[in-house]
Image: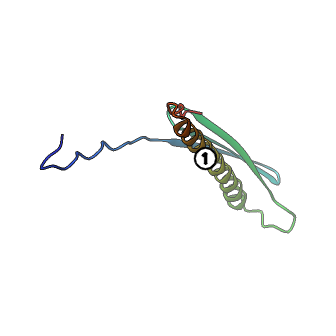
Amino acid sequence: MAVSGHAAAPEPHSSEWSVRLRVVEVGDLTQAHAVLDTGLNLIEVEAEAHRSRQDPADPAIGDELAVGRALTALGQQLIHHGSAAAEAADSARRRGAPPPDSAW
C-alpha cells in the first residue's frame, strides 16, 4: 500500500541453499563430491587433487585443493545456469512471450 504518494517497497525474496561436501583420500588421490541443494534443484560436481612425490604428505592440502576445485566447478555451473535463464527471459521479453520457468 502506498503511503504519502510513495510506492510500497517490494517484498524481499529470501531462500536458503545448502552445500554438502564429501572428501575422500586414498593414497595420493583426494576426491571431493559437492552437492548444492537449492530446495528446488540439485547440482552435483566432483573434483580431484593428486599429490606428487615432492609434495608433503599433508591430507589437509589435498582436501583444500579438491574442495576448492569442486566449489569452483559448482560456481561455474551456477553462472552457466543463471546466464542461460537470463538469456531465455530476455528472448521471451523481446518476443512478447511470458518469461520461461527459471528452474533448471
Residue at x 49% of width, y 41% of height: 17
Q: In which quarter of the image is the C terminus?
A: top right
**Vertical relation: 63 (above or below) 46:** below
Q: In this view, does 3 lie to the left or right of 85?
A: left
Q: Is residue 72 or residue 92 the one in the foreground?
A: 92
Which of the 4 image quarters holds residue 50?
A: bottom right
Horizontally, residue 84 falls left or right of residue 48, namely: left
Neighbour class for label 1 at 10 Å: few (<14), some, many (≥20)?
few
Label 1, secondary structure: give it.
helix
**In the image, residue 98 lies at what x, y percent?**
50, 30
Residue 40 to residue 28: above or below: above
The residue wearing badge 1 is: 83
Q: Residue furthest right?
A: 53
Q: Residue at x 82, y 51 (%)?
A: 27
Q: In this view, does 14 lie to the left or right of 96?
A: left
What amino acid type is highlighted by mark number 1?
Ser
Q: Where is residue 87 in the image (x, y as percent from the top left)?
A: 60, 43
Task: Tell me where residue 75 appears, x and y as whole percent.
Answer: 62, 51
Which of the image's four quarters has the N terminus? top left
Residue in the picture at 81% in, 59% down: 51
